[in-house]
Image (cartoon, coloured by chain):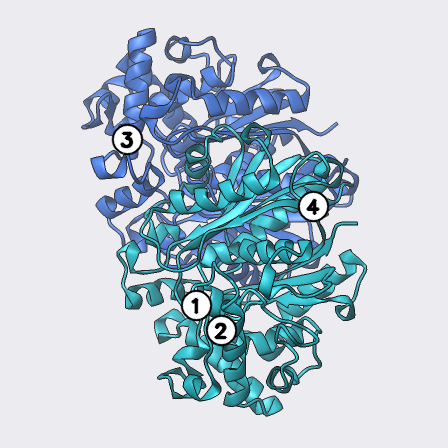
Chain colours: A blue, B cyan
Amino acid sequence: MARACVVGAGMTHFGVHDKPLEELFAEAALSAIHDAGVDGDEIDSLYFGNAMGGITENDTHLAPKLASYLGLQGIPCQRFEDACATSSNAFKHAVQSVEAGVHDVVLVGGAERCTPETGLDTKEMTRTFASASHRTYEQPLGLTFPGVFALLTKRHMYEYGTTEEQLAEVAVKNHDHGRYNPRAHFGGQVDVAEVLDSPIVADPFHLMDCCPFSDGASAVIVVSDELAESFRGEPVDVTGVGHRTDTVPIADKNAPVETTAAKEAATEAYEQAGISADNIDFAEVHDCFTGAEVIAIEALGLVPEGEGGPVTKRGETHLSGEMPVNPSGGLKAKGHPIGATGTAQIVELTEQLRGEVGERQVPDATKAVAHNLGGDTATAVVTVMEAGQ
Amino acid sequence: MARACVVGAGMTHFGVHDKPLEELFAEAALSAIHDAGVDGDEIDSLYFGNAMGGITENDTHLAPKLASYLGLQGIPCQRFEDACATSSNAFKHAVQSVEAGVHDVVLVGGAERCTPETGLDTKEMTRTFASASHRTYEQPLGLTFPGVFALLTKRHMYEYGTTEEQLAEVAVKNHDHGRYNPRAHFGGQVDVAEVLDSPIVADPFHLMDCCPFSDGASAVIVVSDELAESFRGEPVDVTGVGHRTDTVPIADKNAPVETTAAKEAATEAYEQAGISADNIDFAEVHDCFTGAEVIAIEALGLVPEGEGGPVTKRGETHLSGEMPVNPSGGLKAKGHPIGATGTAQIVELTEQLRGEVGERQVPDATKAVAHNLGGDTATAVVTVMEAGQ
């Protein structure tokens, strides 16, 4: 079986864009295509992720539309929807198609518009995002995602003594990282007091504990290791992709703070890669809220259970620490255009493992992990990538 | 590489249902699971198709929700959206995952609710379906799907002399077939005059040229040929799955009446199966409108170009003819719950090739083809299945 590599990566600035979805995606895709040095007619297939386009774009046949816009009409195209883990799942299938020899060169990516540029205001977009919570048991109660992750985080605080100050440290760190990422929605020096002084959204989360609504797109080119040498882009190996799910309603989960799907997906990804969490040099994790990052680094085995808060406060997950987490700024500062987030993590892993990100470079990084959640932590995709040999 | 087989098939009645999507899908899935004789804990993955759920269900994290409802929480799950070809694309990926050895036993299916039971009336649902036409060039003009296929069919009439009477014969035949399918939305003896007397929807289509809006679900169990013997269900081989796309706007297509994506997908599927159209014993095709069936049987190479109308009028595509088309009743009579249609065709192929469908049985059928279109014929998935050896 072939090994899959990423040979090209591209993404737009994450933030507010006044262009249609196809232009956003084309910017990311053409950037990845250029980075790889691949010709359009070499691309076999498009694996595309978009979560909310039925509602936000009134568009339910996106994959061939976007392919045609790129001049790729004719190739097989598919759109995935798995809430916030949408493009990670598209990436998983692209990787599997290359490993199986079904395709040689695959364009995979995601795009989403989440700001009032869509015509939906913040209230309407909050309701749109809530379409990924449980239709029967959660939506009628008004449980939106700040609430879902607030419940998880409150439980973490109860079980482990995690504090609001420790959560705020996640925001401080990720905004600091965002300063060095020219494609980040936000970035700047903030302090714990500013986070704690920002308005409460859902206890324990203040406004600055929450990721923004962003527009954006991301894309990568996946090829087999045998072909990788024929492209200009420096290959980065995809050595493991784990994918697990859990029951959707937060109230139904056996071990909500464990994020079982993420823990199991990480185990699967590490096994595929033949490594353990100890071998990881840095991580991009799904920090839609500060509490989510604390929980994520525990689920990935990067820190002991319950230690996510103290480890963050001690600065160990800062770029300058032992285990940098979200050097890109994460969802918190880089932004979170839902369907684009998964492959944006892959873009960051690719560029970091090539050593080409400048001031936010994790020194000597050779192995990294990406952790992408969907909905009430009910979909989790964990990817291990390693610098090419 | 393993060969994939279907060992279990199930579907709901297609029509009007007053139950939620998860119950609809569970009915089809449990029927397929029972037919296969597979235990729940043997199922590795769920490949699920639903096209419009963001709009119609306000639910954008369907795959893990439906898996949990079936007691399958934890397994990797994914939702596909490719307009009306949604669950065929899910099926393609399920087949590829089994062929590659990624999964051993996969549940694949689709579900959709399209009737006023969703809370959306016919006008709102027509607008919802139109979300699969081109957002920029077609939706603002009010081009809905009767219009898209009317334009295609008018061109076919212009190029080949196809008549409204010949189109009406498709409806007459498929309603006749529907009489023998207990799961069909419609079925009964109608004549050409009744079709032509029904109100015009979009010239040349009368109301009875159009498929209905239906609720429904369908599912199959896909396993490798090596494992097939260990299950109760009689295996039917999947020997080819072709998948191609085309540019979306009907006005942009090089050869609209050819339905290029379908023609190329058929070529790919036949090549994979090592057969030609001459070897096919019957076909299930995407007859969302009568004209679409005429065009489909030409794209599949089952009849010469331009002969779809006359062949239908001569009765050759009737169950009693040489090349039965849509023995299930097709979308026209069986119904068209968008995301369920692709795998419902696979259900019909499976049951026909096992010889278990009673009065609508195609005698001595050993090879069959399914043809599923998405949107403005911009996605096409063509599947060849063969009776087990």
What amino acid type should be assigned to the residue bearing mark 2?
A: His
Q: CA distance from mark 1 to mark 4?
A: 29 Å
Query: To which chain does the residue with label 2 belong?
Result: B
Labels 2 and 3 positioned on one and the same chain: no
- Name the residue located 28 percent from the left edge and 17 percent from the top edge: A154
Query: To which chain does the residue with label 3 belong?
Result: A
Residue B106 location, quadrant: top right
SS label for mark 3: helix
Q: Position of residue B375 (x, y in %)?
A: 49, 65
In the rendered structure, the answer to whether residue B279 lies left or right of residue B340 reads right
What amino acid type should be assigned to the residue bearing mark 4?
A: Pro
**Mark 2–mark 3 CB contact (< 8 Å):** no
Question: Which mark is on residue A146?
Answer: 3
In the rendered structure, the answer to whether residue A114 lies left or right of residue A127 reads right
Identify whether A68 is placed above or below B38.
below
Identify whether B90 is placed above or below B76.
below
Residue A8 visible, this orientation = no
> Mark 1 or mark 2: which comes first in sequence?
2
- Name the residue located 37 percent from the left edge and 27 percent from the top edge: A175
* Closer to the eye: label 2 or 3: 2
SS label for mark 1: loop
Labels 1 and 2 positioned on one and the same chain: yes
Q: Farthest residue toward the front?
A: B359
**Mark 1–mark 2 CB contact (< 8 Å):** yes
**Mark 1–mark 4 CB contact (< 8 Å):** no
Total tally of numbered discs in the picture: 4
* Closer to the eye: label 3 or 4: 4
How crowded pointer 2 is (Cα within 10 Å; few <14, some 14-19, many 20+) is rated as many
Q: CA distance from mark 1 to mark 3?
A: 46 Å
